[in-house]
Image: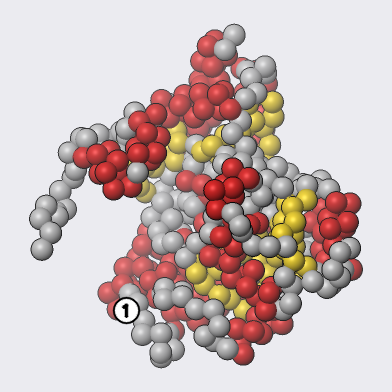
Amino acid sequence: MNAGLSDSRPSENEPIDLHRKHLGRGRSQLAALFGGLVEDSASGARVTTTDGQEFLNCGGYGVFFTGAGHPRVVEAVQRQAERQALSTRLFLDPAVGLAAQALTSVAPAGLDRVHFSGSGAEATETAVKLARAHGRRRLISMENGYHGKTVGALSLTARSFYQDPFRPLLPDVTHVPFGEVAALAEALRTGEGEACVVVEPVQSEAGVIMPPPGYLAEVAALCREHRALLVVDEVMTGLGRLGAWWGSELAGVRPDMLLVGKALSGGVMPVSAVLATPEMFEPFDTDPFLHTSTYSGAPIAMAAVRATVEVIRDEELVDRAAVTGARLLDALRAIAAERAPRLVREVRGAGLLIGVELDNAAMAGELLLEMVDRHVVVNHSLNAHPVVRLTPPATLTPAEEAELLTAFDDSLTAMAKNFS
């Protein structure tokens, strides 16, 4: 029996020591930049550290759209855990059917089939395998796009920094500039009927890059013209983050497959999904053992999915994201223009996915630190180091909104003095 296991809180240095010993030095070094703070609990838009400090969480990489630990989601997971946390995988499980029904009820019309998994990268892998099962072995994704870091997903994540240590990756993968329809058309002309295009409605990790008007609809039209499959990656943008249920819905596009994650967790349980048309899903219909995972559709995760969809719908969080996001975007732009016009290049976004592009990566790092000093958590962008991202929950209260704006104002004011 292992000694030392208990429910007591760790000593002050224990978390850093344990990370360094068992999880690698990099994570502990990153934590040291933020004062070695250790998370203790989270609820709604708040996260509390072990030393009793409370932070407004406008980060979390898009996971906390409904806030952390939404009570309805927690209750649903607890009920399911007490009844049946995991299933035999031999008998039918009602939880997964109810979760699929809930998710497809808010999905774009025609996406009636669902495959559940645990992460966005797994959803990408599922889509790649379905595409290959349909003979589409040429993959096309967008430069600076982000689709995960497992080998198949990494092949689509077009950034050499993450790819180079793990080559060779999947063959026959082409990357074209995001927003440039002509480049995509040229790529599709080779191998008619052999391609699968994977695209984000808004490139989040690339620094919240907004596409030109009509771009996604033109991508869909090109896919139809060249008999290519269309996969829209909405792991970040879906379920209301952009102020609509789906970014593809905003564009009037129904893809062959749609990837879902992050917000699907309800801030409680890691889970992702691929939504597909019946035609696309047919290989999995034919052989249910073709693509499986032990924890795919786990009852406790399915309870979270069902409750999350109901919370987003019942609390009208999609509309709240649109209204709050528009108000925040205007306010953040005004603050940046007044306090630090030479430091901030642009504030852009849609709904509650907002990017603040600084003049360089060092300034972005400084803004992260300044915000944390003022007890607000925001995120950097993996594919665009000069961009700080804000992904607050749609449950943000007016007082929390004011708190965010005050911290941003004070942070830029301090930076303007330091970088003058």
Amino acid type assigned to the residue bearing label 1 in the image: Gln
Q: Is residue 221 visible?
A: no
x, y percentage for residue 256? 72, 71
* Display coloring: secondary structure
Task: Give the answer, above or below, for where 374 lies relative to 20.
Answer: above
330 or 202, nearer to the observer: 202
Residue farthest toward the front in the current orientation of the protein: 168
Instruction: From the image, tell me which residue sits under label 1.
Output: 84
Quadrant of the image occupied by residue 405: top right
- Quadrant where the N terminus is found in the figure: bottom left
How packed is label 1: few (under 14 Cα within 10 Å), some, or many (20 or more)? some
Q: Is residue 168 visible?
A: yes
Q: Residue at x 61, y 57 (%)?
A: 168
x, y percentage for residue 178? 76, 48
Q: Residue at x 58, y 89 (%)?
A: 287
x, y percentage for residue 414? 51, 15
Going by the image, does 185 lie left or right of 374? right
- Quadrant where the C terminus is found in the figure: top right
x, y percentage for residue 198? 71, 60
Going by the image, does 187 lie left or right of 358? right
Going by the image, does 24 lie left or right of 331? left
Task: Give the answer, above or below, for where 290 lies relative to 240.
Answer: below
